[in-house]
Amino acid sequence: MIPIHFTPKKNQRLSVKIAGGNVDPYLFHKNLSDSVDVGEYAPEVDDQGYYTLPYSGKYELRILQPRSQASRGKTPAYWLEVSIL
């Protein structure tokens, strides 16, 4: 897994689209108490597919797979599109 780093401003909107693979996108920031699921059907994402970023500064997006796949050394292929408005 290669994390994606970006530095947006507070209240910008993030969209993460994934096709293929059995993976989920999670967002990290030093001020977040926990990671945030920013997948298509996550409760944190609005009806248009965007998550409003609560802080300015450096974020990290990680694409994670289920532990059962990772422990067997499987690496799923997927397509990723990230947009920040």
Image (spheres, rainbow, N blue to C red):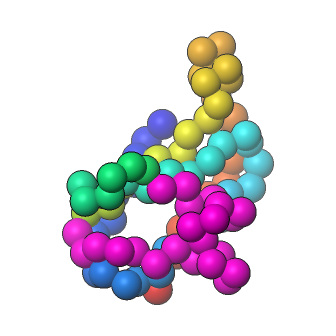
Residue 42 at least partly seen? yes
Magenta stretch?
A: 36-57
At x 30%, y 81%, the residue is 10
Q: Of all residues shown, which one is farthest toward the top?
A: 72
At x 25%, y 75%, the residue is 56
At x 65%, y 61%, the residue is 42
**Is residue 54 in the magenta section?**
yes
Residue 15 at least partly seen? no
Residue 9 % position (x, y): 29, 81
Residue 61, image quadrant: bottom left
- Seen from the viewer's position, the closer of residues 29 and 69 is 29
In-image side of 14 versus 42 (left or right): left
Position of 43 relative to 74 (above/below): below
- Seen from the viewer's position, the closer of residues 72 and 78 is 72
Q: Main secondary structure of the magenta part?
A: loop
Q: Of all residues shown, which one is farthest toward the right?
A: 20
Residue 82 % position (x, y): 53, 68
At x 63%, y 78%, the residue is 46
Residue 41, image quadrant: bottom right
Residue 50, image quadrant: bottom right
